[in-house]
Image (cartoon, helix red, strand yellow):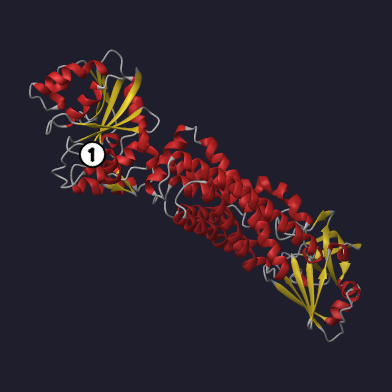
Amino acid sequence: MRATGILILAGGRSRRMGEDKAKLKMGEETLLMRLLREFEGTGDLLVSVAKDAGSPKELTTAYEIDPAFEEEITWLRDEQEDQGPLAGLSSALSLGIHEWIFAVASDMPFADSALLEKLRKERGEAKAVIPVTSDGQVHPLAGLYHRDLAAPLRAYLKAGGRKALSFLETVPVTYVPVGEKPVTNVNDRAAYERAVREDQRPDTVQLVFLALCVGFGMFAKKLIGPLTNVITDFIRLPGGGAAAAFSLMFLVFAAGLTGWRWAGTACGFVQGALALALGLAGYQGAFALITYTIPGIVIDLVRLILPGRGTGYYLIATAAANTASALGANLLVFHFSGRLLLLWLLVAASFGVLAGLVASLVDTRLQNVSEYRRMRRKALRGAKRPRPMDREERMHMERRQRRIGIVLVLALFLMTAVAACGNREEAASLMTIKAGDTEVSVTMEDLDKTEFTGEQVNGKGEVTEHTWKGVLLKDLLADKEVAVTEDSTVTITAADNFGAEYTGREVLDDGTVYLAVQEDGEAVPGIEEGTEGVNVVVFGDKDSKRCVRMAVTIEVK
């Protein structure tokens, strides 16, 4: 004897609606398919249809049933016409193979497994467990019925009975208080339109999930940064392009698991706003709203193209979002070009694919968590379905996509390694000197020369003494064979495009303009957290207004 049969009653004439309610759609699925997906795994799936309904194949097509469910559904036909929903319940009880039958009308789009579990817990000695709302409304077409009711129900129907409430008066019943939403039905067009609007609203669990994705995404970059920096430090690139992939992985989850059209965009914008509010935007400043939002837009666009939640979605969405993030950062801040830009994008794409693989594996493991499964089902209901596949075909596709993902990761990392080795000198550059048509790279070895001490005056007139390690600008230019005269103008520009000008006379002065890579024993921070940078130290400069931080370019004219 099997424990429970899930009976979806789809044999009504739908006179008030004017069309078969089970074929109405919410999102991209029919109401019948929506209920089948919701109750999958809670019991044997039974569907009651009218006596004159078509063949199983015709019904599968008419109700747009996912082929993965075809073998799981048992189609039941009413023995007599116009006997109402009790005829379908009688057919299910007469099978005699289930201890209990959970009967739910096909026009109850919000009935869910939580309602079933609540009724199961209240069974006791009753032969029927029926939900009732706070207004006293009884809902027999979302109830649990014991197999012992098979004979009494047949007799009731044979005697001309049709009303479910009248039949319940003749058997032991437990009434269970429930909320209105799980038993809401759509008897007419107005009720259906209200239900569609209600379905588009976020529920509490989804909002909490989105908030967690935003928070974990911001935390992940900090957590994974030291690990990814092991690679990026070697090739002298900012570490954010790699670490951001694991941050964006959570936005990919947010978009995939809620099914909202612009969930990734919203989460990205919120992350940018939080980064600004909490002072975490760093060198990006107000641009953080843009650099955080663009990857979210890319994720949402990928979800529109790949509505499924398979490995392919995770691989492409994470890789595309991280590459877009790297391009945005380069456009606004880094201004890499040539081989260095290619290397930067390869790193971003490589770690994006790797994070996508991790996301796919996590998704597989979390499907054992009931709330996760519920959100996943809801997201799938709201998405345009890809080409139907049976389970075996779907599993084969998932395995194939993961293998492709692993090959992609290996190939991208190999390309990155080749590009890094061939571009080591360019990647190691901390600064660039421009003089006419000549460009010269400056490395840490060029700057880490000597120790010098002096006083600085801030905007408040406070004087502080510091010890730096670096090089006199005049000596650096001489080492790089860049000519400077007293009539020259030297412009030094920072990563945020702030710049300062110095006369040739100042530069040629032995104790005026220095480039520092350490200050008071600490490395000067670079553009990205954990990287090294260069500061300009100018002695005799009132209020230190020309002490450029995170300098990247020296131009001599």
Q: Residue furthest bottom?
A: 487
Task: Locate residue 304, reporting x and y percent.
Answer: 44, 56
Q: Is residue 549 visible?
A: no
Helix, strand or loop at label 1? It is: loop
Q: Is residue 343 visible?
A: yes
Looking at the image, how many numbered discs can be counted on the residues?
1
Residue 525: quadrant of the picture = bottom right
Q: Answer with left or right where residue 245 lies relative to residue 526.
A: left
Task: Locate residue 44, reporting x and y percent.
Answer: 35, 28
Q: Residue furthest left?
A: 160
Q: Which residue is mark 1?
A: 185
Task: Locate residue 147, reporting x and y percent.
Answer: 26, 18
Quadrant location, the C terminus: bottom right
Quadrant location, the N terminus: top left
Residue 69: quadrant of the picture = top left
Picture layout, residue 513 above or below residue 301: below
Q: Residue furthest top?
A: 125
Q: Answer with left or right where residue 136 lies relative to residue 249.
A: left
Q: Amino acid at mark 1?
A: Asn
* Residue depicted at 49% across the width and 47% down the height: 254
